[in-house]
Amino acid sequence: MSLDKTRNGIYNSNSLKNTFKQIIEHKYFQPIIIGIILFNGLIIVTETYLNENQLLLALDKLIVWIFVLELLLKLIGLGFRGYFSDRWNIFDFSIVIGSLVFYATPFVSVLRLVRVLRLIRMIPAIPALRKIIDSLMKSVPALTGILGLSMLIFSIYAIIGTTFFSEVLEYEFFGSFHASLFTLMQVVTFESWASQVARPIINEIPWAWAYFVSFIIIGALVILNLVVAVILSYLGQDEEAKRQEQMSQLYNENRELKQDIKEIKDILLQKNHSKRQNVSERNQSQDENAS
């Protein structure tokens, strides 16, 4: 009797798990969640105009509990191991739990920050965005070398700028090492670098044009393009891997098909040979009987 109860309990739990899994894998489940996230963003934007509006607060609480329900559905449908094996699910879990923990906090700024972070759930919800972020994360080790080179070049040019240009412009441009770094960041982004920084210095120190031109060529045109090239290479890696996998699968299927055709051909040849042999033996026996 107890064994039957145990079996029924396992069957019911598996049935519930399969039901929830079918729900979260339904084609309309993810679009609904994306729509709720967008609606949540609309509520947050509206709250910037209508502070402490009770309707907006009630809708925000409702959305939080919808996210909790989604979390429970995925936990039951995928299981704890299956759910937490995906790092994006871990990210979703931390956002939802953070929304619950900080909802009653007296720190309004923390609560608003957590509510804004809920919009980041749009990234794992949309495959295209998730692919871009995954590629960026994979490219981080390759970007460390470029980052180190950038810091070295910025430091060298900042020291040169502080040494030679500190008395030409105001202190906020090249008066100190950190001020020079910020000015070089302005130059590399092409934000008023010529009229506000370069030309006043070149009027006082004519050779300064070589300083700015060389820094722009190295910093803006070379290093930034290297960063873009590395990120683009990792963006295409997944597609290339899928293409290689498809080609390998086609190659294996083609090889298996050739093997099957060869086996069928051998079988047909054997049957044809045995048939000819039988006909030859029959003719030989008929000749012997006639003689």
Image (cartoon, rainbow, N blue to C red):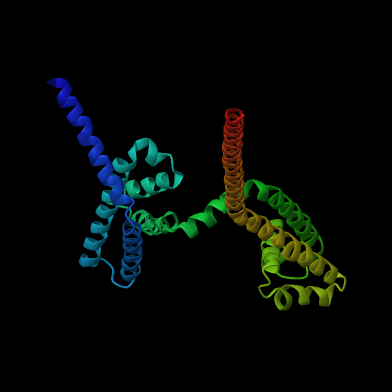
Depth order, front residue of 79/51: 79
Q: Is residue 111 left or right of residue 91?
A: left
Q: Is residue 199 above or below residue 126?
A: below
Q: Is residue 39 left or right of residue 272?
A: left
Residue 55 at x, y percent in the picture: 21, 66
Where is the N terminus found, in terms of image quarters?
top left
Depth order, front residue of 230/257: 257
Residue 122 at x, y percent in the picture: 41, 59
Farthest-out residue, front:
291
Q: Is residue 171 above or below residue 13?
A: below
Q: Is residue 258 left or right of residue 171?
A: left
What residue appears at the point 38 percent right and 41 percent down from the top-left corner? Answer: 83
Say if residue 105 shows up in the picture.
Answer: no
Depth order, front residue of 247/214: 247
Count of labels in the image:
0
Where is the C terminus found, in terms of image quarters?
top right
Farthest-out residue, right:
207
Say if residue 12 shows up in the picture.
Answer: yes
Residue 52 at x, y percent in the picture: 25, 65
Q: Is residue 4 above or below residue 67?
A: above
Q: In terms of image quadrants, where is residue 193?
A: bottom right
Q: In terms of image quadrants, where is residue 173?
A: bottom right
What residue appears at the point 80 percent right and 59 percent down from the top-left corner? Answer: 160
